[in-house]
Amino acid sequence: MRPAFGRRLSLDQAGCVAGAVICGHVALDDDPTVELLRHERVPLGEYVFKVVEVRPSQSDGTFALSVPDQMLPSATGQRCELRYSVCARSEREAAGAPLEVTASARPHLAGDPFATERPLMSWDARHFHIELSDARLEGGGQLVGRVHRHGDWPPGKIAVTARSQECWRAAALAVRGLPHWEFKTLWERHHPIRTDLDSMWVPFHFDLPQWLPPAVEATTLAWRYELIAQRSVRYWFDETAVITPLLHEGAALRRGPQLIRDHISSSAIAAAAGAACISPMPHLRGRGSVAERRP
């Protein structure tokens, strides 16, 4: 399959919102198919997933792609990227165009934070827990909530930490078949709180920088926001409560798009997305770095 250069595929608009219909025109021979592709670029390579597929009109080459309601938005981090393209391909040719997708969602908590495919940090401490009152999980947003005690306040200092993590699957399978995730901390802030014996809770507030990506749970990558309340304990482990609110997950962890990395050639993907498909590299050992501020 060879890429078709020039305006062989055109879209009526360069971007859309989740749930919309994208219309366009394709000029390829041999009865082509038109696919909406999701590209997930991680440090170890790039994975391409087919979201939906249609056949254009045989008379004039027009097509209409229905974008699913629960599409993940286009987003870019420091080492990972999630983007979309519309690709038309036949037996001999392929052409494509990039597509920017925006989406809206409500913050929520995972139904099963300890699921094997994506373990999330979420638990209560013995003497306190975290409650969220406002969570705008994207650049320019905020995290507002409180640390609520169980019974009396325990002795020792308590500090609340907010951080943004960029995560990706380092290998398809790890020990005993469980996926292994690597991470890099994009942003982190600490806020010590002062407890009052007469108060049941203590508030906290964090403003998020504009450059942070939205909270997204995709198949091979994720951007997550974590809140950690930690009490220092002498001669023992620190007492910790953690919560990981989610925003965009949609079909990412249910019956998601079909992986097509194995049966679409790299030249076709390059023509559709404007970038070559990178083959996965060998697994790199080691964990992510500590907090790092963007220059």
Image: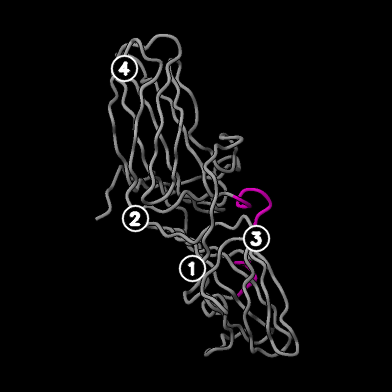
Helix, strand or loop at mark 4 = loop
Decide which of 140, 221 is in the foreground and name it. 140
Q: Which residue is mark 2?
A: 211
Q: Which residue is mark 4?
A: 195
Lower position in the chain sequence, tag 4 or tag 3: 3
Give the label on residue 68, or none. Answer: 3
Mark 4 Cα-neighbour bin, 10 Å: few <14, some 14–19, many ≥20: some
Mark 3 Cα-neighbour bin, 10 Å: few <14, some 14–19, many ≥20: some
Q: In 3D space, how far apart are the residues under numbered discs 4 and 3 (Cα atoms)?
A: 47 Å
Q: Amino acid at mark 1?
A: Ile
Q: Amino acid at mark 4?
A: Thr
Give the label on residue 278, or none. Answer: 1
Mark 1 vs mark 2: in front: 2
- Left or right: residue 235 compared with residue 52: left
Q: Amino acid at mark 2?
A: Trp
Tell me the magenta residue range: 250-264
Label 1 close to label 3 by CB (< 8 Å): no
Quadrant location of the C terminus? bottom left
